[in-house]
Image: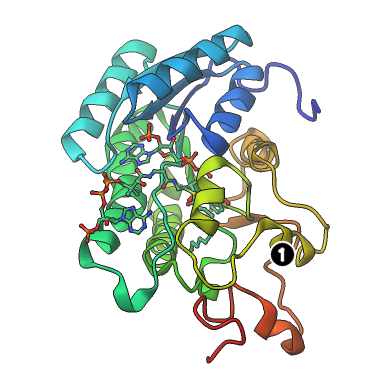
Amino acid sequence: MRCFAEGLYNSRTVVITGGATGIGFAMARAFGSYGAQVVIVSRKEERLAAAERRLRGLGVEAETMVCDVRDEAQVKRVVEQVVDRFAAVDVLVNNAAANFWSPAESMSARSFRTVVEVDLYGTFHCARAVVPHMIDQGGGCILNVTTTDPHRGFPGFAHAAAAKSGVLGLTTTWAREWGHHGIRVNSIGPGPTPTEAGLNGMTVGRPDHPPSFEIQMRRTPLGRLATPDDTASAALFLCSDAASFITGVNLSVDGGISLPVPSGDLQSDPFIASPRTPQGDD
Ligand SMILES: CCCCCCCCC/C=C/C(=O)SCCNC(=O)CCNC(=O)[C@H](O)C(C)(C)COP(=O)(O)OP(=O)(O)OC[C@H]1O[C@@H](n2cnc3c(N)ncnc32)[C@H](O)[C@@H]1OP(=O)(O)O
Ligand SMILES: NC(=O)C1=CN([C@@H]2O[C@H](COP(=O)(O)OP(=O)(O)OC[C@H]3O[C@@H](n4cnc5c(N)ncnc54)[C@H](OP(=O)(O)O)[C@@H]3O)[C@@H](O)[C@H]2O)C=CC1
């Protein structure tokens, strides 16, 4: 589906963390297909190389850089390289994340820290490194990837819920702090999306009522799951000039799954009931 003007992102440099797989890859392909110079960064060189090949095969101008977003010094180096090479960073998409199911009462501090460091600190490091350049160039756009309605509570995902809620706090605060520099900061909240990582996050290790994407689909008013392209299309809009007066929002791309549910349905919702007891004890 080509909903936007051809060349919408011509001459724009778009940096996407975690852009070699899943939703990040769909965003890289989408921005690139509308003319952006795309730079994808993540830890695993082999994933980056495969993604670069695929993107170039589609005619996208893609570059890759190895970087662990938890490491502030690495992030700074990568941003300097991007600015040296392309003169500007017009759009930063903070998409890299870690997640796995883990009941709160047995979650180790290290597990909690791992997810918070990737999702929350990673977002902080990348924005912190990019923003001085955006200020110098007179503006830019930051898009943080959160999740649909992170304040709602996600049993089994306390680390990700804390991290993504923190990212929402960064989004609104940065929107206020950097607006007068012409920098817009928004976030986007995908609904359950059957990427490989999404499937693992939903299912691996859960002994009780395996929460399937099918359940999520049934609970979604629009009757299907999110696709990576759904989120990519919303990202194209939010980072474009069509959204030039939009800052500080979290746009859910979830087919309505985060809408309040009637109280009678609460016990059968695996994201509301406890993951250990299907009937829920809360
Ligand atoms: C609001 C949002 C709601 C979300 C609710 C919906 C969820 C489903 C939708 C999915 C949303 C997504 O975010 S999908 C995006 C997810 N993508 C990814 O996770 C891909 C990247 N993943 C990774 O890099 C790895 O899996 C990850 C572990 C996270 C990072 O690896 P590291 O090498 O840095 O860390 P490790 O040293 O291996 O592990 C650190 C600690 O974490 C524990 N740990 C690691 N994997 C574990 C696992 N599968 N199950 C239990 N525990 C695990 C280890 O035991 C360690 O604790 P100790 O034993 O105490 O030392
Ligand atoms: N799928 C879903 O159902 C949902 C997803 N989301 C969010 O959407 C985004 C994309 O998720 P999805 O595409 O499903 O998952 P993926 O696992 O495919 O994407 C995560 C990416 O992050 C990269 N990454 C992980 N850790 C680091 C790190 N320390 N430094 C740099 N890069 C890192 C990974 O690459 P590498 O291993 O090479 O580092 C990977 O490419 C995430 O922010 C996720 O939280 C939100 C709600 C639902």
Residue at figure coordinates x 27%, y 25% from the top left? 78
Residue at the front extreme of this rendering: 207
Tell me which amino acid carries mark 1.
Ile
Residue 146 visible in the displayed image? no
**134 or 82, which lies in front?**
82
Q: Position of residue 73 (x, y in %)?
A: 16, 34
Image vertical order of residue 32 relative to residue 227, above or below:
above
Q: Is mark 1 within 8 Å of ligand 1?
A: no
Where is residue 203? Give x, y as percent: 53, 58
Percent across and percent down for residue 54 are 56, 14
Q: Residue at x 31, y 46 (%)?
A: 122
Q: Is residue 85 left or right of residue 58?
A: left
For image coordinates 54% across by 49% down, the residue present is 198
Q: Residues within 10 Å of mark 1 (few under 14, many from 20)?
A: some
Q: Which residue is mark 1?
A: 215
Question: Among all residues in the image, which is located at the extreme left?
Answer: 73
Ligand 2 shown in quarter? top left
* Residue 132, percent from left and from top: 29, 35
Residue 11 falls in which quadrant of the image?
top right
Q: How is the image coloured?
A: rainbow
Write the residue at 65% across / 60% down: 212
The quarter in which the N terminus is drawn is top right
Q: In the structure shown, which secondary structural element does the residue marked by tag 1 occupy?
A: helix
Between residues 282 and 41, which one lies in front from this camera angle? 282
For this orientation, the residue located farthest to the bottom is 281
Residue 171 visible in the picture: yes
